[in-house]
């Protein structure tokens, strides 16, 4: 494998890390909003549907964190043949997760969530492009599959 692709593996993991930070910001905005936005005399965070959304967001954020850590750990150990698969997994999962978390944050904010200038609206827009650069989500899936084929030979 050429130097160019080893560098791409590093970038893929760092894109994942950046999207982890974006998702954490979207989650924090949504959680804070859910605690203060009132509906029917109660904060919307008291409603089970909102709690489920926030719990899923937190779970996906944590799962992405561990995939990113795994890719970085393998790279630091010099296990470059394993880095390819995990860097693609980290990039794919984290970018897709950030998109879902930002979308849910907008949903929790309701109509105000799509208002230009509201932080979650900006985070949703910013979460789209990383799903394309350093290899689209489809390319990541192909890379992961090819690495799985190698693992099972």
Image (tube, rainbow, N blue to C red):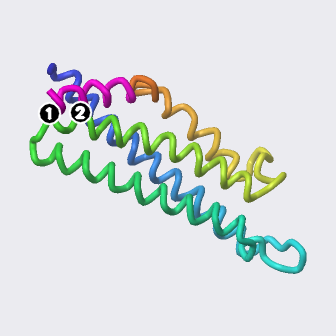
Position in image of residue 38 (x %, y %): 83, 74
| Near-viewer residue (28 or 139) | 139
| Near-viewer residue (14 or 55) | 55
Q: Which residue is mark 1?
A: 81
Q: Residue at x 27, y 24 (%)?
A: 146
Position in image of residue 115 (x %, y %): 80, 47
Under circle 1, the secondary element is helix
Q: Which residue is mark 2?
A: 84
Residue contact at pointers 2 and 1, CB within 8 angstroms: yes
- Residue 90: image tag: none
Q: Residue at x 80, y 55 (%)?
A: 110
What secondary structure characterizes most of the magenta part? helix
Q: Residues within 10 Å of mark 1 (few under 14, many from 20)?
A: few
Q: Residue at x 67, y 55 (%)?
A: 105
Q: Which contiguous range is marked in magenta?
A: 140-153
Query: Which residue sits furthest right?
Result: 40
Q: Is residue 146 magenta?
A: yes
């Amino acid at each position: 494998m050429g130097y160019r692709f080893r560098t791409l593996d590093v970038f893929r993991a760092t894109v994942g890390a950046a999207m982890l930070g974006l998702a954490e910001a979207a989650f924090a905005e949504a959680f804070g909003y859910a605690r203060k936005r009132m509906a029917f005399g109660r904060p919307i965070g008291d409603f089970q549907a909102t709690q489920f959304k926030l719990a899923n967001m937190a779970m996906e954020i944590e799962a992405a964190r561990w995939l990113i850590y795994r890719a970085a750990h393998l790279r630091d150990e010099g296990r470059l043949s394993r880095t390819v698969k995990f860097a693609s997994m980290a990039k794919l999962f984290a970018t897709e997760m950030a998109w879902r978390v930002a979308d849910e944050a907008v949903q929790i904010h309701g109509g105000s969530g799509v208002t230009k200038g509201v932080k979650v609206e900006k985070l949703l827009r910013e979460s789209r492009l990383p799903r394309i650069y350093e290899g689209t989500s489809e390319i990541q899936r192909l890379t992961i599959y090819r690495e799985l084929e190698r693992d099972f030979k």
